[in-house]
Amino acid sequence: MPSILQVALDTPLHRLFDYRLPDDAGTVQPGSLVEVPFGRTRQVGIALGPVADSTVGAGKLRDVIRVLDDRPALSPDILRLAQFCADYYHYPLGAILLATLPPRLKNATPFVADTPWLVLTEAGQAAEPGARARAQRALLDALRAAPQARDALRAQKQGRHAAALVAAGWAAWTSVPPPTADAPRTAESPPATAGQQAALDALLPALGKFGVHLVHGVTGSGKSELYLRLIDAVLARGRQALVLIPEIALTPQLEQHFRRRFPGRRFATLHSGLGEKERAENWLAAPECDVLLGTRLSVFAPLPRLGLIVVDEEHDASFKQQDGLRYSARDVAIARAKQRGVPVVLGSATPSLESYAQALSGRYQLIELKQRAISQARLPDIELVDLKHIPLDNGLTRPALQALTDTLGRGEQSLVFLNRRGYAPALYCPSCGWVSPCPRCSARLVLHRTSHRLKCHHCGLESRIPTECPSCGNPDLKPLGQGTQRLEETLTARLPAARIRRIDRDTMRPRAWAELGAAVHGGEIDILVGTQMLAKGHDFPNMTLALILDTDGALYSPDFRATERLFAQLMQVAGRAGRADKPGRVLIQTAFPDHPLFRYLQRHDFSGYARALLAQRRQLDLPPFTRQVLLRAEAPTMAAALAFLQRAAALAPATAGVSVFAATPAPMARVANLERAQLLIQSAQRQALQAFVRDWRPQFDSIRPRVARWSLDVDPLLF
């Protein structure tokens, strides 16, 4: 009798699907990828195991088309992690499981990974080819010394001999070569500072068991060195390390740094900047690697020997997915570490208030690095330029220009930070007041002069720059405000001798970071102009000045997290200055120099500011002292979006301790021609809130008419 197989599919439905497994299919391991019919199409799904019976009639059950045995099954720990995410984020299990896979592996087309390395097998260690097989013997001897690249073997016309060794079982093709015998497993490391050694004394005994450890270290304190030493200890035990980083841009330079430290180890990287084939091959190579570096989705990578998870810059908002499965990679990393019984290290100079509150309560171990790793380096002096008394000239004040000139004269480097790419935030008509609107969003079209386009940074719409005002016909349109392109133009005109490089998403690609690092370290750049891409993870020893422009908007933002993010951003940018033996200086242009945030910042007092913010949050009943879920709705009209949310609120179960607020338009009310509204639910108890949403979510399917698209955001960061 054919068995029945439960399959998870990438659909918005919170259910699994039953299929008949043909007799000749054999046993299907849970986690295997299968191709099945679905409606009029075919889909790749994840087999979760057989079931004794099905609610679907035997005559309606459809057959599994085939098992995709050209790719490995998802491991039991990944299946458990996906189930945790499905339960906590109230998202379909099938959609989560398929989201963990590289796109190429979700395609049923047969996939064969490149295997560019020929390596010796155990049988080949003592193999002795016949006396006449001199070429095979020579190739075996070469393999005993080091793996051989396929391209090199082809160039030497040894492909036939390689095939003979593979056929004999003496060699095999692989995607990730084992380390060469003579390569040192770990390169020599610099002496640990007193702070680093104290941290290691606390962390090393914790290896091998679950625990969350928050490393709060000032910028330049050597957190990366601490990670490397912990990873070395984990690798020595035969285990693997997963390192999560927030930005794709940081992956190449961090990979180089890790490879220099561990020349005899195997590495893999995973991020969306890789091509589909390379990403699939790296995912397939992950089980054999020693260290995996990647961005948030890497938290789901297959790592059977996992021994340590590191989340660098744990406060960074990019660890939270903002569409589809709205998960926090930091929180999922903690869940995975708990399931596997391994430690997780969260590192940041400006930890999130959620993590810091957990550390203050004792749930996380707090480890502090209060001094910079280089003994001569000290934290930079932070000065405020009061815009109420000093006028701006194209976005810059006279003290700022003088500081740049002085730094240039000393042969040192500067960073000018403006978190707004493009030439100007909008195009403006001084005659009638028209400001370039996006026709599809509640936003302005940003002027990009280098590409001669107006672009929306929310929906991606682009249009030509108009020759005259669409409202009144005035041909004299002006750029309104400053972007990094305009700032670069201004600095080039004011400092013609300076070698200036702009760093933002319009200029940089992941592979360009290695070239940038070499240029900065080689003294080929005097001034870096950039956005938040420059704010974290970069170590430029000759950079002594950080100039920060136009940050006041966050001080009067309605978002309760705005000042927390601003403080972290300013401290991270300030931390780029004075990281070596030369003193650093930071200038911040602001119209609010008396704001308490700047007083804490000038003292480099994250702990003081965090405690003050936590006291405010407790009084206002805000996270981390309460838990939140946001129900979002999108519809062609705002009335439809709000009507859906109001009907959903009417269906909410009465639950003690859970508050359901009124539906309101979203702060960015219109994106890509869809009106957006939201409804906030919160509770001081996580379990009560989870139980509420678990009972409430199925009610949404009964709401008619279905004119709105909805999503749930558990622990939202952005509103």
Image (cartoon, rainbow, N blue to C red):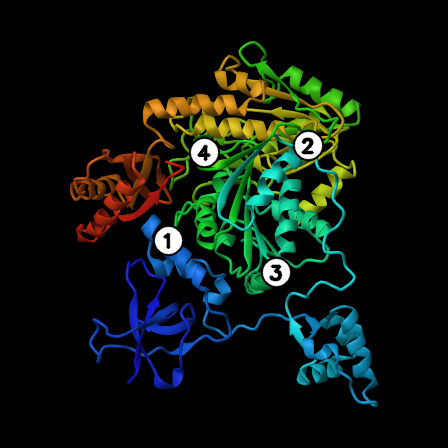
Q: Alpha carbon of mark 3 to alpha carbon of mark 4: how far?
A: 34 Å
Name the element at disc 2. helix
Q: How busy is the neighbourhood of tag 2: few (under 14 within 10 Å), some, or many (20 plus)?
A: few
Q: Alpha carbon of mark 1 to alpha carbon of mark 3: how far?
A: 25 Å
Callout 4 amino acid: Gly
Q: How busy is the neighbourhood of tag 4: few (under 14 within 10 Å), some, or many (20 plus)?
A: few
Q: Upstream in the sequence, badge 2 or badge 1?
A: 1
Q: Alpha carbon of mark 1 to alpha carbon of mark 4: how far?
A: 24 Å
Foreground: disc 2 or disc 1: 2
Instruction: Determine which quarter of the picture holds residue 121.
Output: bottom right
**Numbered label attached to residue 116:** none
What residue is shown at x 51% (from left), y 49% (from top)? 209
What residue is shown at x 53% (from left), y 19% (from top)? 600
Callout 2 amino acid: Ala
Dots 2 and 1: beta carbons under 8 Å?
no
Q: Upstream in the sequence, badge 3 or badge 4?
A: 3
Q: Which residue is mark 1?
A: 84
Name the element at disc 1. helix
Callout 1 amino acid: Phe
Instruction: Determine which quarter of the picture holds residue 681.
Output: top left
**Extreme residue toward the front, this view:** 205
Q: Alpha carbon of mark 2 to alpha carbon of mark 1: how far?
A: 40 Å
Q: Which residue is mark 3?
A: 289
Q: Upstream in the sequence, badge 1 or badge 3?
A: 1
Q: Alpha carbon of mark 2 to alpha carbon of mark 3: how far?
A: 32 Å
Foreground: disc 2 or disc 3: 2
Q: Which residue is mark 2?
A: 194
Q: Upstream in the sequence, badge 1 or badge 4?
A: 1
